[in-house]
Structures are given as C-alpha cells and as structure tokens.
Amino acid sequence: MPDPSDRPEVHLRMLVGDDAEWVVDTDRASATALARHHGWELDKFRTELDEGSWASDDRWAWGVIVDGEPAGFALVTGLASADAEMTVRVHPRFRGRGVGREVLRQLADHHFSDGSELNRLTGRAHEHNVPMQRVFNAAGFRMEARYRDSFEQAGGGYAAEWGYALTRADWEAGRHRVDDQGYDLHGLVFEVDEVREGPPAHGLEVRFLQEMRRAIARYDAYHLIDGELAGILTGDLLRYRFVHTEEHRNDVTAQVLGRGRARLQRRDDGRLELVDQWTDERGNHGRRVFVQRHVPDDEV
C-alpha cells in the first residue's frame, strides 16, 4: 500500500511539439487490455502539437508533470459543447500515489474556470478497470451510466464501460476537492472469509458502488442470484437492506428481503474487512466476515 503522506507534486502544462516523443512513449507504456493506446504516429502528432490543433476551443492536450518529471498526459475533447470528455494516461511508474485523482481535479479547475459554457466533464472506465473507477470516485465524479458492449477488446468481443461526470454545479460546490470522506468502497469486491453464525455462504461475492455515503452492491452465491443491497455508510458502519432470489430443487425460487449492518476495519495487509450481521424477513440470521479481494494498482 502507498504511504498516504507520500503526496507527489502534480501539475499540468500545455503540450508542445518537443513533448511528442515522450507522450507517444507514455501512451504505449501505459496501454493495457483495459485502456488501449491512441496509436499516434510520432511525426504527425508532433506537427499537430506545433500547429496548435491540440490547443483549440474544442480540444486540449495537457502534459502531466509529477515531481518535475513527465509522467503522463490528459486529453479533453468537446470543449466547444456543454459536455467535454477526458482521457487520462499515467505512466505505470507513477501510479498508486493519487496522481490520477489530482489530474482530474486540476482539469476541472481549469476548464470550468475559463469562462466557457462548459457544463459537464465526463470520462469512461472499462468495467474491470477498478483503479480508474476509484480515481473518478475520489475526485468527486458521479457514476452515471453503464455503456454496454462499448469497448472493443483486442481478443475479440466487447466489454462494458462505466460513465462518470462532474458538473459545473459539483465543481462550484467543491465536490471534487473533498478529502477525508471516510471509507471508499467504490469498485471494490469482497469475498466471504469466515461464517461465524448462520447458513454457509459458498461462493458469495459482493461488488460495491458508492456515491458519497450511499452504497449499493450486487451479489451472487451458490443457489442465490440477482442479489442487491443498498445502504448508508456512516463512519465505519454500513446499515443496509437487501433483496435476492433463492433457487431450490425442482426449479422452485423464492424472493428474500432483509436488513443488516456491517462494520468496516482495515487488516494488517491493508485490505478492508467487513464484519457483517444480517437477518431476513423469515427470521433467519447470521454473522460473517468478508475480506476485500486484492486488485493491483496497474490500470488507469
């Protein structure tokens, strides 16, 4: 886990022709199956930067500088409309230190304060790119949509993307600069580590989305489908209600509703742990411990 006190110095500057080589190299180095590269041809891209086509009323290219070193780039397109879309790439060497979050914050400060008619800054993240999803959430961007089959995969087929946005009203309220919001469950997946009381939970997996204090999650397990919970996270306590479908023999199904409370704490290895107590409308109840599935900070 990165040291929270190790905050790098991040700033943005306009890209010029002399930056073309390192930007193209960074584009290639930062590309993954979840964030494809732009495929720029070096000389053509250098000419575009020299001619100012990436510093216009409609689009802008920024260099990301971290502790005095070139570390990535950010592209903003559609600035001539009310909705602009961003793409951010950070070199793998600089990831996991809060750089992406600070880049999004500075992009918002610049483009909303320049006197334009811009009303929304938007971006997308592959459905499996959890680090980028968490970057958007940490910078105050709200998840607004799931774009099905919008990302063409290198191996064939399509994947979904999550859509995020920060509005001018969000920016004016300082939403993008709010720190110390407590626990952030957005994009995290939890698996059952221990059942202390109640029925077994074979294969139970909970996938969270969060907006400020509101948390929702989808879950499935053996003989349990289409589960969803929604609740409010106050400090380290999540109070929630849930509904799911249980499958029984002979294709018999039953819909089950209930409520619960889960206490959050951090393990010695840095992962989050949920100590959960639940009860359903039939009087069944249980206690179990969930642990966060490890996701590397190597996407963005």
Image (cartoon, helix red, strand yellow):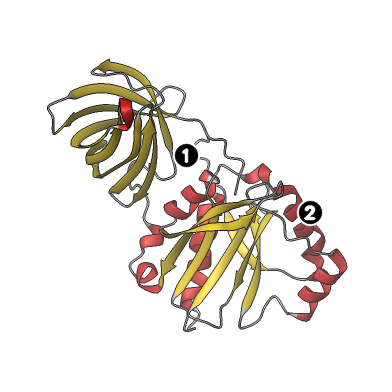
Q: Nearer the viewer, mark 1 or mark 2?
A: 2
Residue 201, disc? none
- Closer to the chain start, of discs 1 and 2, is 1
Report x, y in % for residue 187.
44, 44
Residue 4, disc? 1
Quadrant of residue 238 within the rendered picture: top left
Looking at the image, residue 39 lies above or below residue 180: below
- Of residue 168 and residue 251, the one placed in the foreground of this image is 251
Report x, y in % for residue 81.
52, 82
Residue at image point 50% right, 66% down: 122
Residue at image point 53% right, 66% down: 107
Secondary element under disc 2, as helix, strand or loop, is: helix
Looking at the image, residue 225 lies above or below residue 103: above
How busy is the neighbourhood of tag 1: few (under 14 within 10 Å), some, or many (20 plus)? few
Residue at image point 40% right, 73% down: 168
Residue 25, disc? 2
Secondary element under disc 1, as helix, strand or loop, is: loop
Q: Residue furthest front?
A: 250
Looking at the image, residue 20 lies above or below residue 58: above
Q: Amino acid at mark 2?
A: Asp
Residue 112 left/right relative to 252 = right
Q: Amino acid at mark 1?
A: Pro
Residue at image point 18% right, 24% down: 285
Residue 163 left/right relative to 150 = left
Looking at the image, residue 112 lies above or below residue 247: below
